Amino acid sequence: MKSRDRRQGIVVVNTGEGKGKSSSAFGMVFRAAGWGMNVCVIQFIKGQWKTGEQEAAKRFDNIEWHALGDGFTWDTKNPEQDIKTSRAIWEFAKEKIRSQQYDFVLLDEINYCCGYNWISGQEIADFIRQERPSWMHLVLTGRNAAEEVMEVADTVTEMRKIKHAYEKGIKAAQGVEF
């Protein structure tokens, strides 16, 4: 693995209506951990819901996992609390990035927070430009990525839904979707 002083970090955005944004990012998490990088995963929406990715991450000493959200906020009964929670998670994420302890940071589902206007895309983009260490890999996932965030990113992928099992009445499948 290249040392930090020889590495150019990459900012990746996975967005769009299709499935696979977080799944792709989790693949990068395990790839980075496999190379010995220190990894931090911060989830903005999912709360204490048990996932296979989180269970797998427990097997790695170099992955730190924080599922801090209030759950699936599109069903929210308390938008003020969702804003408060998202802002607190964003402050936590900035501190983790500023600590320079991690080679790779995943901000899972942060793009939803922009789409709901809980955190501005400009604020995120400014932080990335001004405070992310140049050697740190940073991945941001979720629908509705802000234009400002996509502009600052090195790689942007938009997932497009063609069809989804849920439309046939098939619920989320363990091992495939969580």
Image: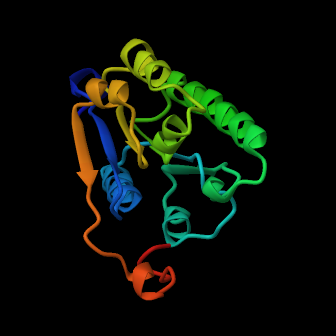
Residue drawn at x 51%, y 83% is: 171
Relative height, residue 161 to residue 170 (above, below): above
Q: Position of residue 50 (x, y in %)?
A: 62, 70
Q: Position of residue 146 (x, y in %)?
A: 39, 32
Residue drawn at x 56%, y 26% is: 94
Quick one: 90 or 1, which is closer to the camera?
90
Quadrant assignment for the N terminus? top left
Q: Is residue 153 left or right of residue 67?
A: left
Q: Quadrant of residue 81?
A: top right
Relative height, residue 129 to residue 82 (above, below): above
Q: Quadrant of residue 18?
A: bottom left
Q: Is residue 16 left or right of residue 55?
A: left
Relative height, residue 31 to residue 87 (above, below): below
How many numbered marks are there? 0
Q: Is residue 128 left or right of residue 162?
A: right
Residue drawn at x 44%, y 19% is: 122
- Report whether residue 9 is seen: yes
Relative height, residue 87 to residue 28 (above, below): above
Q: Position of residue 101 (x, y in %)?
A: 50, 31
Q: Position of residue 153 (x, y in %)?
A: 28, 30
Q: Is residue 138 left or right of residue 94?
A: left
Quick one: 1 or 13, which is closer to the camera?
13
| Residue lying furthest bottom | 169
Quick one: 163 or 107, which is closer to the camera?
163
